Image (cartoon, rainbow, N blue to C red):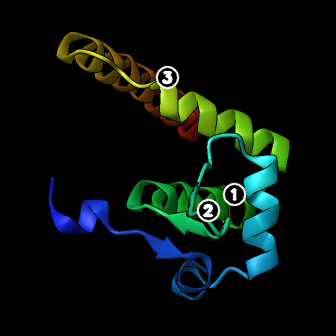
Amino acid sequence: MCALENRRYPISEVSEMLDIPLHVLRQWEARFPQLKPKRDQANRRYYQPTDIEILRRIKQLLHDDKMTTQGASKRLTAEMRGEGAPQTNSEAQELIDTIDTEARKMLDILDNYDHD
């Protein structure tokens, strides 16, 4: 494990790094059970790189994808469990084949639509 993986970031540094206000980080900690920053003996929050990645994803889901907090939490839980993602190469190939088949069907429909 490298030193950066063990690095801990105080909440003020994370706030500046991700351009997220301190009070929002505290709210997200209360609303997203996936987010669990460590605390020192003085009860100050310290975020690890994995926490920062979770925060980036939460920000994307809420701000870019316009999801609700509840929806974002459910999506994040599913992503962290690996749900919906192919687990093996054969599952990935099956998904690719399905997408390819559906895309070809759509192209056929569009071709027929253009000729009408």
Indicate the position of residue 112 as horizontal and vertical percent values: 53, 29
Query: Residue at (62%, 41%) from the top-left corner?
Result: 34
Question: Circle 3 is placed at which residue position?
Answer: 84
Q: Quadrant of the C terminus?
A: top right
Are dots 1 and 2 in contact, CB under 8 Å? Answer: yes
Q: Badge 1 local density, few (<14 within 10 Å), some, or many (20+)?
A: few
Q: Amino acid at mark 3?
A: Gly
Cα distance in 3D space between marks 1 and 2: 6 Å
- Residue 67 in view (yes/no): no
Relative to 47, is 11 on the left or the right? right
Relative to 28, is 56 on the left or the right? left
Indicate the position of residue 74 as horizontal and vertical percent values: 71, 33
Figure check: 54 above or below 12: above
Question: Circle 1 is placed at which residue position?
Answer: 65
Q: Badge 3 local density, few (<14 within 10 Å), some, or many (20+)?
A: few
Relative to 4, is 29 on the left or the right? right
Secondary element under disc 1, as helix, strand or loop, is loop
Relative to 40, is 69 on the left or the right? right
Cα distance in 3D space between marks 3 and 1: 18 Å
- Residue 105 in view (yes/no): yes
Cα distance in 3D space between marks 2 and 3: 19 Å
Q: Amino acid at mark 2?
A: Gln
Seen from the viewer's position, the closer of residues 84 and 107 is 84
**Quarter of image, res 43:** bottom right
Question: Circle 2 is placed at which residue position?
Answer: 60
Query: Residue at (45%, 22%) from the top-left corner?
Result: 102
Q: Residue furthest left?
A: 2
Q: Amino acid at mark 1?
A: Asp
